[in-house]
Image: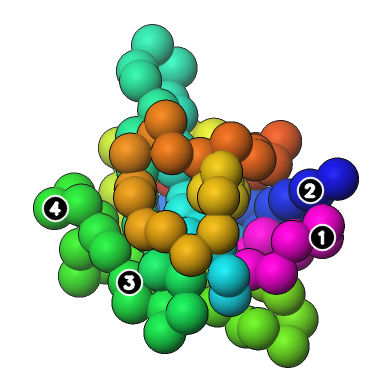
């Protein structure tokens, strides 16, 4: 059974940095595309960063590229999201996700079948 447990959320001020962690069990993160999504009240869930299986190539949408960095620690079977220059509009629940099948990269939300419970990030102005 796959379990993804996020940690590291909290309340920060605009311009601050925050790092989220996702500890995985039941799968080997290096064999799966992994990603972070976020969902704000009244908005659809959106991708904020993905990392490919194998070599761990990052993938970012325009909204987060240059500010967010996704990384992976294979020894700890964990994925991280470093968020810099945070803005109030980054306020959301952040979810860690694992692809539904190994050895395949697709960052559409429908390609992910395992999800954590989420961690709240609140950025005050």
Mark 1 neighbour density, 10 Å: few (under 14) some (14–19) many (20 or more): some
Horizontally, is 53 left or right of 101 in the view? left
Residue toward you, 98 or 14: 98
Where does residue 115 sit, x and y in percent of width and height? 64, 39
- Of callouts 4 and 2, the N-terminal one: 2
- Of callouts 2 and 1, the N-terminal one: 2
- What label does residue 2 carry, if any? 2
Please say whether residue 12 is visible from this viewpoint.
no
Residues drawn in magenta: 21-29
Mark 2 neighbour density, 10 Å: few (under 14) some (14–19) many (20 or more): few
What whole-number distance in Å separates the C-alpha atoms at marks 2 and 1?
A: 6 Å
- Of callouts 3 and 1, the N-terminal one: 1
Residue under pointer 3: 58
Where does residue 26 sit, x and y in percent of width and height? 82, 57
Residue drawn at the location 74% of the way across and 61% of the way down:
27
Q: Nearer the viewer, mark 1 or mark 4?
A: 1
């Amino acid at each position: 059974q796959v379990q993804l447990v996020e940690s590291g959320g909290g309340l920060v001020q605009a311009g601050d940095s925050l790092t989220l962690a996702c500890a995985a069990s039941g799968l080997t993160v290096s064999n799966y595309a992994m990603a972070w999504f976020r969902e704000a009240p009244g908005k659809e869930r959106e991708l904020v960063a993905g990392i490919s299986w194998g070599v761990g190539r990052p993938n970012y949408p325009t909204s987060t590229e240059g500010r967010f960095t996704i990384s992976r620690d294979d020894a700890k079977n964990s994925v991280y999201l470093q968020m810099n220059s945070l803005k109030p509009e980054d306020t959301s629940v952040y979810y860690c996700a694992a692809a539904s099948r190994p050895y395949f990269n697709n960052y559409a939300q429908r390609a992910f079948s395992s999800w954590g419970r989420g961690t709240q990030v609140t950025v005050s102005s």
